[in-house]
Image: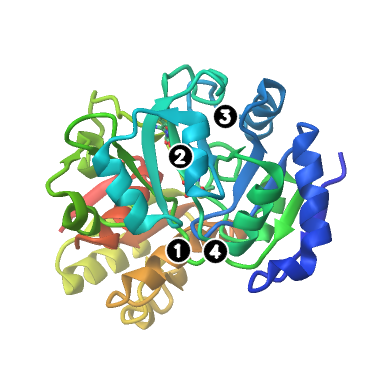
């Protein structure tokens, strides 16, 4: 299959309405379209069509018990697909939609069991990205996982999508780089006290500010492999990984740098070092050194993380030594993705 690339103006996608309508028509005929969102690129399919949904699992090589998030363009559309929405959920919707917050809610019968990976709940979100919003208005609700091959880092630009899915999907809408760069926060609001299943750019603090104390699924903060099964089925798989093995080093910055230099010098493989703006020059001569951003600006690090993983792939490194992040807020999401990419390989110095 030839994968078409549609370039659109993300600031004013209405200029490219014809291209968006082409894509919406492909979706209505059960095709697959990758499209930009404010978090990462999604691989969209008609949320109501079993035929289309099965194509997603096949194109990504995704296990069929890993449910998909449904993307809507209007808040009212939640009632088409979900029921028994709690008051806390409504408060969060009013505060954070459109935006990078997925709510797990009870599903209606019209959503095929394939979309929900066998569960009677679904994840739903309303993206704030203009292109995504216009596309979904034209196509109707879309089931959309991140548009990467299963296990690979989520794509934050159209090139990443092409690298993974060229010739496996009908088209990609190229709307530039994603604003946040990490997947949405996932919150289960089917219980009296909601539970955070995946941290993201809508932080724990932002959520608790609106609805009070919430629970955190144990697997969100764990830093070693345990038997606990995450409530978001997708979080149990090794994830987000570049080709190389990652080792995360945490501790006081000067000790971290000293240890990474030592590890790099004693490695007999091609080494990559994931540094920050402040430390990158200290690793001169130790391997392929890439800065993931400014430690004082965690939003920049979130936006770069998956892109940097893919850059290490392009350099064909075999081992990556990465500086870790210990803060709360968005750093919780950054470290969560980094730990899963490293398969819990962490050294505390
Ligand atoms: O930002 C995002 O959420 C992106 C963009 C494209 O919107 N999408 C995304 O989808 O990250 P995906 O499929 O890569 O991750 C979806 C996660 C999986 O870990 C899945 O297990 C969880 O959401 N999930 C989906 N439905 C669920 C449900 N009913 N209960 C618990 N977890 C669910
Ligand atoms: Mg994903």
Quarter placement of the N terminus: top right
Q: Which numbered disc, 1 or 3, marks the residue that appears first in the sequence?
A: 3
Of residues 309 and 286, the one drawn nearer to the viewer in this rendering: 309
Q: CA distance from mark 3 to mark 4?
A: 23 Å
Q: Which numbered disc, 2 or 4, marks the residue that appears first in the sequence?
A: 2
**Circle nearer the viewer, 2 or 4:** 2
Q: Residues within 10 Å of mark 4 (few under 14, many from 20)?
A: many
Q: Which numbered disc, 3 or 4, marks the residue that appears first in the sequence?
A: 3
Which residue corresponds to mark 2?
124
Residue 168 appears in the figure: no
Q: Of helix, strand and loop, which one carries label 4?
A: loop
Q: CA distance from mark 1 to mark 3?
A: 24 Å
Q: CA distance from mark 2 to mark 3?
A: 19 Å
Q: 22 above or below 104? A: below
Q: Are marks 2 and 4 in contact (CB under 8 Å)?
A: no
Q: 86 above or below 327? A: above
Which residue corresponds to mark 3?
62
Residue 121 % position (x, y): 40, 25
**Circle nearer the viewer, 2 or 3:** 2
Of residues 102 and 63, the one drawn nearer to the viewer in this rendering: 102
- Whether ligand 1 has any atom under 8 Å from the Cβ at mark 3 is answered as yes
Which residue corresponds to mark 1?
180
Q: Quadrant of residue 323?
A: bottom left
Q: 285 above or below 183? A: below
Q: Which numbered disc, 2 or 3, marks the residue that appears first in the sequence?
A: 3
**Circle nearer the viewer, 1 or 2:** 2
Quarter placement of the C terminus: bottom left
Residue 93 % position (x, y): 36, 50
Which residue corresponds to mark 4?
178
């Amino acid at each position: 299959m030839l994968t078409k690339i549609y370039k659109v103006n993300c600031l004013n996608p209405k200029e490219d309405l014809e291209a968006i309508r082409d894509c919406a028509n492909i979706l209505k005929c059960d095709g697959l379209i990758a499209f930009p969102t404010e978090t990462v690129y999604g691989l969209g399919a008609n949320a109501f069509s079993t035929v289309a949904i099965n194509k997603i699992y096949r194109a990504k090589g995704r296990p069929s018990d890993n449910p998909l998030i449904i993307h809507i363009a209007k808040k009212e559309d939640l009632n088409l697909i979900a029921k028994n929405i709690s008051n806390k959920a409504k408060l969060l919707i009013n505060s954070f939609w459109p935006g990078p917050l997925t709510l797990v809610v009870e599903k209606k019968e019209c959503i095929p069991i394939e979309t929900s990976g066998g569960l009677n709940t679904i994840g739903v979100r309303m993206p704030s990205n203009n292109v995504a919003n216009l596309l979904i208005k034209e196509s109707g609700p879309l089931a959309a996982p991140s548009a990467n091959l299963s296990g690979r880092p989520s794509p934050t630009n159209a090139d990443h999508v092409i690298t993974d899915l060229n010739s496996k999907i009908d088209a990609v809408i190229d709307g530039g780089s994603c604003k946040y760069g990490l997947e949405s926060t996932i919150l289960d609001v089917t219980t009296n006290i909601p539970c955070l299943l995946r941290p993201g750019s809508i932080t724990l603090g932002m959520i608790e500010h609106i609805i009070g104390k919430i629970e955190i699924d144990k697997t969100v903060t764990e830093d070693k492999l345990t038997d606990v099964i995450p409530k978001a089925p997708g979080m149990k798989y090794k994830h987000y990984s570049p080709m190389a093995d990652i080792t995360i080093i945490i501790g006081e910055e000067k000790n971290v740098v000293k240890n990474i230099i030592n590890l790099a010098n004693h490695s007999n493989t091609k080494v990559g070092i994931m540094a920050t703006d402040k430390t990158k020059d200290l690793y001169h001569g130790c391997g392929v050194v890439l800065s993931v951003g400014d430690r004082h600006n965690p939003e920049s690090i979130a936006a770069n993380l998956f892109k940097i993983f893919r850059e290490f792939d392009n350099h064909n490194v075999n081992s990556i030594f990465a500086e870790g992040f210990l803060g709360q807020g968005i750093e919780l999401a950054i470290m969560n993705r980094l730990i899963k990419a490293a398969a819990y390989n962490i050294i505390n110095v």
